[in-house]
Structure formats: structure tokens, C-alpha cells
Amino acid sequence: MSIKLENVSKTYLHKGNRIEALKPVDLTIQSGEIFGLIGFSGAGKSTLLRMMNLLEFPTTGSVAVGDVVLTDLDKKSLRIKRQKIGMIFQQFNLIESKTVYENIEFVLKAGKFDKKQMKSRINELLELVGLSDKHDQRPGNLSGGQKQRVGIARALANDPEVLLCDEATSALDPETTKNILKLLKDINKKLGITIVLITHEMEVIKDAADRVGVMSAGEIVEINDVYSIFSHPKHTVTQGFVQDIYDFIVPKHIQESDAHRLVTLKFLNDNAEENHLNQLYREFKLDISILNGRIEYIKDEPLGIIMLSVSGEETEINRMLTYIDDIAGVERADIYG
Ligand SMILES: Nc1ncnc2c1ncn2[C@@H]1O[C@H](COP(=O)(O)OP(=O)(O)OP(=O)(O)O)[C@@H](O)[C@H]1O
Ligand SMILES: [Mg+2]
């Protein structure tokens, strides 16, 4: 299901102060996509997410999931519709005194299953998240990753159309994070559920998101497909988030001059795996050496970044730079940050 926000804003009143947690935003998340939301602490990510299931009511604007305008619903209809919007959290929010099985049963009780249907549904969910053997365990006996799997099973219990994830992997180590993201991607593919993923980690975005919104001070300052966010970040906040992949340590002994330049290049998509450097070696009477280089895979699409040390005659260097600017899919990179 798509999620459509129109002119949605949220202002909190706190000790007589107005806090504009979310400035008016229009945002459409497409049905079936994984939409990543990234930003620093306090940027308004959780506030924006809470607007999508009306966990809190917006100060202005309307929210629709599919054709249903949530902001127009009465309490009862909203409660029913909300069952179709799953949510998972950083802190898992499981009931410690209940078993894994009971934690899921608990949310199904609100629905209309008899005992037998309930049992088979819970078993099906536990299998989906790879926890069939943890049935009778209590959360205290599970690892962080396993707890989040229970959280995911519980969120999926009532066949949601949308899954909202607020820092779902932030309490997990990198390996477990990868596994949970893989599970979320599988669920997105297999069940066609629209997923909104809040994170402050670019790795999570790089691995999982189709599109990305970057938030700062209550606004979405940039929105694009994930590859463009990494290859052509526009806003300074976005550039700050991706700078890691452009950050090369420049060797101390290198002094730039007209006759000696450091040139950083981006190789987009298929160009990342092609050897354009041979062309440069052949075409130009210059000393070209590779100081540093890497290939990043962004949702399996390569982005290559290489830093070259180039020395020779200034006119020849400039000729090379002009030549590079004409190669499709190869660009000179700015160093961000
Ligand atoms: N219930 C509330 N009452 C008052 N202010 C709030 C409330 N909830 C959030 N805020 C304020 O709104 C702003 C946005 O908060 P929000 O929790 O959405 O940020 P966030 O991007 O999710 O941050 P984090 O990465 O730390 O979770 C912050 O300034 C926060 O203090
Ligand atoms: Mg938050």
C-alpha cells in the first residue's frame, strides 16, 4: 500500500514552548517500496513515522494509507485499520513475562482467529522469521537479533500492508543487522509489504532502501533513489552522511601544484567495473598513479571511487580533465565534508 502525507506537520507544546518537530511535508511512499529515512538525532524521523499510523495526530494535514484517509476515520475504524500497519522498535517492546508464542498470540487475540487457526498462524510466522525452535522461550533467553525477529513476527501477525521500523537494527551488531535487514528485504519481496525504515546508519540505507529521505530540523531536505543519494548527494547533510565513502587519506608528502594534481573520480554503475584508467594511461603523457580506490555496492549496484596522483605538464593535465569530463558514467568527484 502507498502512504500519502499531505501538508503534515507536528508541533509539540512543551513547558509553554512550541517545538516544531515536523514542518509541513508532502510525501508519497510508493506501494511495495522500502523507503529509508535518515537524519541526526532530533531531526524529526520518529515524529514523521508516528504520523504514518497516527500514533500521534498531526497538527495539520492528512495521512492516507492506500485509499483510506486515516485522518478522517473515527476511533473504531482507525483501530481496525491500524492492525494493518505493523511497527517495530529499537527496544523490541516484547512482554518479558510471556513466551515467544504468547507475545505473538497477544496481538492476534484482538483479531478474529479461533485457537487452531491461531496456532497455525503463529507457527507460520515463527517459521518465516526463523524462530520455530524458540516457541516456548521467554525474551530474556533470546539474543538481540532473535528478539527483533519476534518483534517482526508480531508486527506481521495481522497481515499488515505497511511495516514501520524505528531504528529496528540500532541495538544490534553489524552482522545481526545484516541478517535482520535481509529478513526485512525478504518480507518486502515475498509479501509485497511497503516498509519505512528509520536509521541513522548509512550502511542500513545502502543495504536495504530503494528510496531515501534525508531529514534535518523537522524537514525532509533531500529525497532520491538510494544510488543517487550516494553518487550525487546534494544537501550538505546528505553529503555529511555519505562522506565516508569519499574520504581518502591524502599521503602527507604530496603537495598539490599546477604540475601535480590529486584527481578523484567517480565511476558510475557498470563503469565501476570497467578499466577506464587504461585509456588515460594510453592517451596522455602523464605520470598517473592510483593513491586509493574502492568500489561500493549500493543495493548491488557498483559505485567506484578512485584517487589519482597526476603529474606532468599543466596543459596536458587540463587536457586529461576535459577528456574525463566527456566520458559518460565517469565524473570528477568533489570531496565532501
Ligand atoms: N512528545 C514530545 N513532546 C515534546 N517534544 C517532542 C516530543 N517528541 C519529540 N519531540 C521533539 O521533536 C523533535 C524531533 O524528535 P524525534 O523524536 O522525531 O527525532 P528523531 O529524528 O527520531 O531523533 P532520534 O534519532 O534521536 O530518535 C525533537 O526536538 C524532540 O525533542
Ligand atoms: Mg527517533
Image (tube, rainbow, N blue to C red):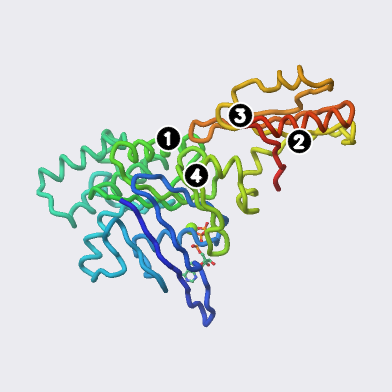
Q: Determine the residue positioned at 66% across, 43% down.
A: 243
Q: Amino acid at mark 2?
A: Ile
N-terminal-most mark, 3 or 4: 4
* Cβ atoms at labels 4 and 2 below 8 Å apart: no
Mark 2 burial class by Cα count in 10 Å: few <14, some 14-19, many 20+? few
Nearest to viewer (mark 1 / mark 2): 2
- Residue at the far bottom: name it: 16
Q: Position of residue 252 (x, y in %)?
A: 85, 34
Classify residue 289 as left or right of residue 53: right
**Callout 1 amino acid:** Asn
| Element assignment for label 1 | helix
Circle 4 or circle 1, nearest the eye: 4
Q: Is mark 2 within 8 Å of ligand 1?
A: no
Q: Quadrant of residue 315?
A: top right
Mark 2 lies on a secondary structure that is loop
Whether residue 96 appears in this view of the structure is no
Front one among 30 and 187: 30
- Amino acid marked by disc 4: Asp
Q: Which residue is mark 3?
A: 295
Q: Mark 2 = which residue?
A: 249
Give the Cα distance between marks 1 and 2: 31 Å
Q: Secondary structure at mark 3?
A: strand
Q: Which mark is residue 225?
A: 4
Residue 135 is situated, as x and y percent measured from the top left of the image, at 25, 39
Front position among marks 3 and 1: 3
